[in-house]
Image (spheres, grey):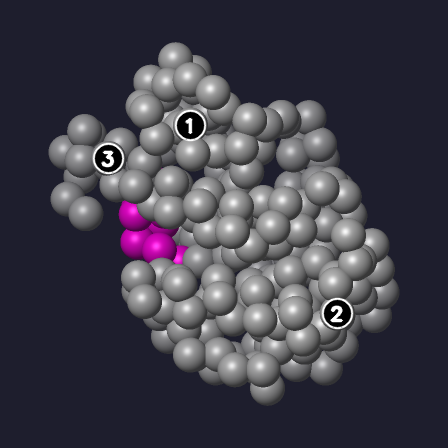
Amino acid sequence: MVIDFDTAALGVMRMAHHAGLRDWVPATSGNFSVRMDNLHCAVTATGGDKGQVTMEGIILAPIDGPAPERQSAEAELHYVLYRLDASIGAVAHVHAMPAVLASLTAQGKDHVRLEGLELLKAFAGLKTHETALDVPVFENDQDMIRLGRIAKERLAGIRPCWGFLIAGHGLYAWGPDVTTALRHLDAFDYLFRLTLKLKGVPV
């Protein structure tokens, strides 16, 4: 699929505003992108309130090339995902509190398990609640190039996979399009909240 920058940017704004309304991107955190083709994407620029982002806060970026001006360092992980899987059309990164708490309560494991819950069927390809979805957890790292390499190596062997956590940092979630990526974001938020409550963690 090939879409123009303006259309992609509207999708970016839709995800960012959705996240802003839910307090998932406090203090200028988070970033969002939409693939335009195999070479480019539209992505939120560094800084600014993502929950109120406008067209001026979205930039054109190469998926595999020199970083454009105003690029957030975290955008590198978006590009890693697009290069890893050509079916990924939209990526969202949020600092939602349930996601951060879930990453910190993984008790030394490299994943958070979501299991036996009806809303698992919100994830593309899952047809029953009688399943388990292991959400990878990576250690936080300010070196996004290094973190991207680690994520690429691990994610390449995981299917299905619609998101991962960075410990103490936040959630990356994606889908083939904006609508699906948002559905996955909402599902992760609900399932993390429920899992935390079952563990007695107040959310």
Q: Nearer the viewer, mark 3 or mark 1?
A: 1
Q: Amino acid at mark 3?
A: Leu
Q: Secondary structure at mark 2?
A: loop
**Earlier-in-chain disc, 1 versus 2:** 2
The residue nearer to you, when weighing 141 against 124, is 124
Crowd around label 2: few <14 · some 14–19 · many ≥20 (10 Å) = few
Q: Secondary structure at mark 1?
A: helix
Task: Tell me what residue is drawn at x 32 percent, y 67 percent.
Answer: 21
Which residue is labeled 2 in the image?
Answer: 4
Q: Is residue 48 above or below residue 182?
A: below
What's the distance in space between the residues labelled 3 and 1, CA to CA? 15 Å
Residue 77 screen position, x and y as percent? 65, 54
Crowd around label 1: few <14 · some 14–19 · many ≥20 (10 Å) = some
Residue 154 is left or right of residue 22, and the answer is right
Residue 68 screen position, x and y as percent? 76, 77
Which residue is labeled 3 in the image?
Answer: 194
Q: Is residue 183 above or below residue 70?
A: above
**Earlier-in-chain disc, 3 versus 2:** 2
Q: Which residues are magenta?
A: 95-102
Residue 118 screen position, x and y as percent? 32, 24
Q: Nearer the viewer, mark 3 or mark 2?
A: 2
Q: Amino acid at mark 1?
A: Lys
- Residue 107 image-quadrant placement: top left
Which residue is labeled 1 in the image?
Answer: 121
What's the distance in space between the residues labelled 1 and 2, CA to CA? 31 Å
Mark 3 and mark 2 residues within 8 Å of each other at the beta carbon:
no
Q: Amino acid at mark 2?
A: Asp
Task: Tell me what residue is drawn at x 39 percent, y 62 percent.
Answer: 19
How would you classify the magenta stretch by its main secondary structure?
helix
